[in-house]
Image (cartoon, helix red, strand yellow):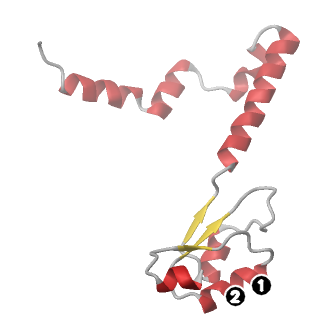
Amino acid sequence: AQAYAAAGADVIFVEAPRDVAEFQQLPRLIDKPLLANMVEGGDTPILGKDRLQALGFSLVIFPGGIVRAIAKAAQAFYGTLARDGTTDAFRPNMFDFDALNAVVGTPEMLALGRRYEGTA
């Protein structure tokens, strides 16, 4: 990590600190912005953004969390469908049509499309 810092890296990532003491040591050894990679179930203890900032880290990522959450939701969804033959029991966990469109920005995308409409 120190060699990368000396070579001019803008941000330093050290793979899998094993405990808080290792996190504390890194800012003292490396005078560059530090990135923490939080992987649920990995070797590194999960620390929140405020704790990491207090320890001297500039960036934190949680790269796999969304995939784990989506996979669990998909498993529950398909389990409900397989068990019941319908998704009715799972509907409280789902957006309705209008809410989903609002979340993904469909009205804004359509408005932007109208702005660029033309005749060919």
Residue furthest to the top = 85
Quadrant where the N terminus sits is bottom right
Count of numbered circles on the image: 2
What residue sits right under mark 2 in the picture?
25
Disc 1 and disc 2 in contact, CB within 8 angstroms? yes
The disc labelled 1 sits on which kind of residue?
Ala
The answer to whether residue 32 of the structure is visible from this angle is: no
Q: Residue at x 85, y 11 (%)?
A: 84
| Image side of residue 8 versus residue 52, left or right | left
Q: Is residue 120 above or below residue 1?
A: above
Corner quadrant of residue 83: top right
Q: Position of residue 72 (x, y in %)?
A: 77, 35
Q: Residue at x 65, y 82 (%)?
A: 55
Corner quadrant of residue 120: top left
Viewer-proximal residue among 13 and 81: 13
The disc labelled 2 sits on which kind of residue?
Gln
What residue sits right under mark 1 in the picture?
21
Q: Residue at x 18, y 26 (%)?
A: 116
Mark 1 nearby-residue class (10 Å; few <14, some 14–19, many ≥20): few
| Image side of residue 6 versus residue 13, left or right | left
Where disc 2 sits, the SS reads helix
Where disc 1 sits, the SS reads helix
